[in-house]
């Protein structure tokens, strides 16, 4: 990974925190496609969305992973998991698309936050209202950080993530490991901009993640 992607640091932080910080606020100023309700990501054709979600997973995982798709009211599960993994296209900003494949621990910790953000968006809540709700939910224990090591696969070639300027950019396939409260210094990393083998996003937070790039061919493509 090169310094060309230095803008991804705040965007991956946004993934960790589900876009509830500055990137989400910035997204309200962006024009929405005609097919999208105000404040909501553009809704995709279901078959396309399922294929994109599963493209985040390794092939052996994709065939038995649960699948969620986004509707106007929030995410809807259309397939149960047979292996503990869950796939969906996350939107940390309304204009981004982040196909993710979460293991069982991610389904317990990260997924409920993703689902709630989409639900609140569907209810027409403002970014600030969502931020307050999610922050309060973390304090009250409604949302809990990971309690053991685990992985989120993002092996898709169609990752479009927030950048540091309030827009979006492509980002290569990668995997993310739960690392609550870890910092780049702990990892001996200078951060993604230094072009190292790994870096920490959301460093110092309960939902910090170690990011490791992988070869593009590792992904599952577009299984049906």
Image: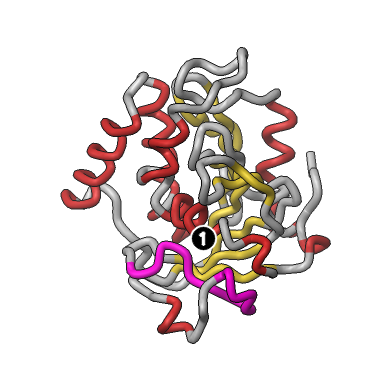
* Left or right position of 217 against 208: right
The secondary element bearing badge 1 is classed as helix
Q: In which quarter of the image is residue 96?
A: top right
Q: Answer above or below: position of 211 versus 162.
A: below
Q: Position of residue 82 (x, y in %)?
A: 60, 51
Q: Mark 1 points at which residue?
A: 9
Q: In which quarter of the image is residue 222?
A: top right
* Left or right position of 156 against 151: right
* Left or right position of 65 against 138: right
Decide whether residue 194 is among the magenta residues.
Answer: yes
Q: Position of residue 55 (x, y in %)?
A: 73, 48
Q: Answer above or below: position of 205 versus 196.
A: above
Residue at image point 47% right, 56% down: 10
Q: Where is residue 173 in the image (x, y as percent from the top left)?
A: 70, 59
Residue at image point 40% right, 26% down: 121
Decide whether residue 76 is among the magenta residues.
Answer: no
Q: Quadrant of the N terminus?
A: bottom right
**Which one is nearer the viewer's eye here, 4 or 12?**
4
Q: Quadrant of the C terminus?
A: top right
Q: Answer above or below: position of 181 versus 69.
A: below
* Left or right position of 224 against 49: right
Residue at image point 49% right, 86% down: 188
Q: Where is residue 88 in the image (x, y as percent from the top left)?
A: 58, 42
Visible residue check, residue 182: yes
Residues shaded magenta = 192-204
Residue at image point 79% right, 44% down: 223
Q: Answer above or below: position of 171 versus 93.
A: below
Residue farthest toward the front in the current orientation of the protein: 165
Residue farthest toward the top in the current orientation of the protein: 34
């Amino acid at each position: 990974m090169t310094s060309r992607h230095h803008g991804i640091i705040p965007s991956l932080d946004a993934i960790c925190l589900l876009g509830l910080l500055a990137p989400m606020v910035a997204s309200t100023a962006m024009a929405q496609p005609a097919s999208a309700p105000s404040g909501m990501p553009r809704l995709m054709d279901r078959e396309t969305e399922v294929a994109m979600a599963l493209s985040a997973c390794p092939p052996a995982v994709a065939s038995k992973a649960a699948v969620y798709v986004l509707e106007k009211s929030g995410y809807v599960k259309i397939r149960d998991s047979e292996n503990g993994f869950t796939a969906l296209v996350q939107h940390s900003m309304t204009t981004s698309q982040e196909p993710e494949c979460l293991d069982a621990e991610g389904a317990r910790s990260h997924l409920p936050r993703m689902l709630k953000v989409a639900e609140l968006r569907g209810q027409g809540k403002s970014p600030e209202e969502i931020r307050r709700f999610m922050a309060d939910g973390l304090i009250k224990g409604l949302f809990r950080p990971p309690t053991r090591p685990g992985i989120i696969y993002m092996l898709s070639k169609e990752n479009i993530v927030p950048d540091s300027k309030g827009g979006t950019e492509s980002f290569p396939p990668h995997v993310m490991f739960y690392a609550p409260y870890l910092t780049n210094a702990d990892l001996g990393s200078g951060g993604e901009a230094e072009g190292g083998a790994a870096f920490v996003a959301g460093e110092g937070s309960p939902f910090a993640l170690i990011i490791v790039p992988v070869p593009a061919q590792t992904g599952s493509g577009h299984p049906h």
